[in-house]
Image (spheres, rainbow, N blue to C red):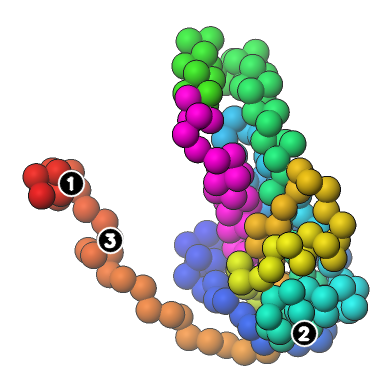
Amino acid sequence: MDTFDAISRRRSIRKFKSDPVPRELITRCLEAARLAPSGTNCQPWKFLVVRDADKRREIMDASFGQPMFGQAPVVIVLLGDAKAYRKRFRTGQELMEAGALTREDGDRAMAAYKEMKSVNDDSTAIIMNCVLAGENMVLEATELGLGSCWVMLFRKDRISEVFHLPKHLFPVALIPLGYADQDPPARPRYPLGEVAFDESVAKAWEEN
């Protein structure tokens, strides 16, 4: 299966078999997430692997009773890591020292980050980076014949309590993993012509 096939075949699975998932497949999914790109390579994520049935029931309770969390043998709690994100300036320095960025480009990037800091909440940038890791994970799960679902409908405060998360970690998404017990059809997507445009359309937008 090539990358586009995995993208095309991925589905949001909400019914799972109880069959256990081999540890090596879970590791592959985690490795795929770990290798995701992130701004200045700050990697502001942590992956909490939950197999315990009681903890999964607590996750289900915090997720308004969504039964998939009780069914799937594994739930990945994708966490944003504010402490790792705060290290991005040091990481930028390391990129310059490694030759991945010129000194001029690195200084410009660091100045831009400082300017963004004054107008943007760090949590937004952390979440955007975590989403890239989560996408890698669900695509690798598809490649391995596993079902998954990207879930953001849950009480973040309750998940933080269940796992006694320190202040610098916060839940971004929940990803149940397991063997699918359903084969849903592809959900409709807008045609490419309704979402992708060239610069002539962008110019028309400016005029309007």
CA gap, disc 2 to disc 1?
Answer: 46 Å
Q: As displayed, is residue 168 above or below residue 3?
A: above
Q: As displayed, is residue 134 above or below residue 207?
A: below
Q: Quadrant of residue 66?
A: bottom right
Q: Residue at x 68, y 80 (%)?
A: 64
Of residues 207 and 136, the one drawn nearer to the viewer in this rendering: 207
- Is any part of residue 178 visible from this angle? no
Q: Which mark is residue 195?
A: 3
Residue 11 point in image, percent of width and height: 55, 76
Say which label, 2 or 3, has the lower sequence index.
2
Mark 2 neighbour density, 10 Å: few (under 14) some (14–19) many (20 or more): many
State the SS at label 3.
helix
Magenta: main secondary structure? helix
Residue 86 point in image, percent of width and height: 68, 31
Q: Is 50 left, or right, of 124 in this rendering?
A: right
Give the residue type that dot 3 points to: Val
- Reading the image, the residue beneath label 2 is 71
- Reading the image, the residue beneath label 1 is 202
Q: Which residues are magenta?
A: 115-144
Give the residue type that dot 1 points to: Ala
The N terminus - image quarter = bottom right
Mark 3 neighbour density, 10 Å: few (under 14) some (14–19) many (20 or more): few
Magenta region includes residue 97:
no
Q: Which mark is residue 60?
A: none
- Is any part of residue 7 visible from this angle? yes
Q: Residue at x 53, y 23 (%)?
A: 114
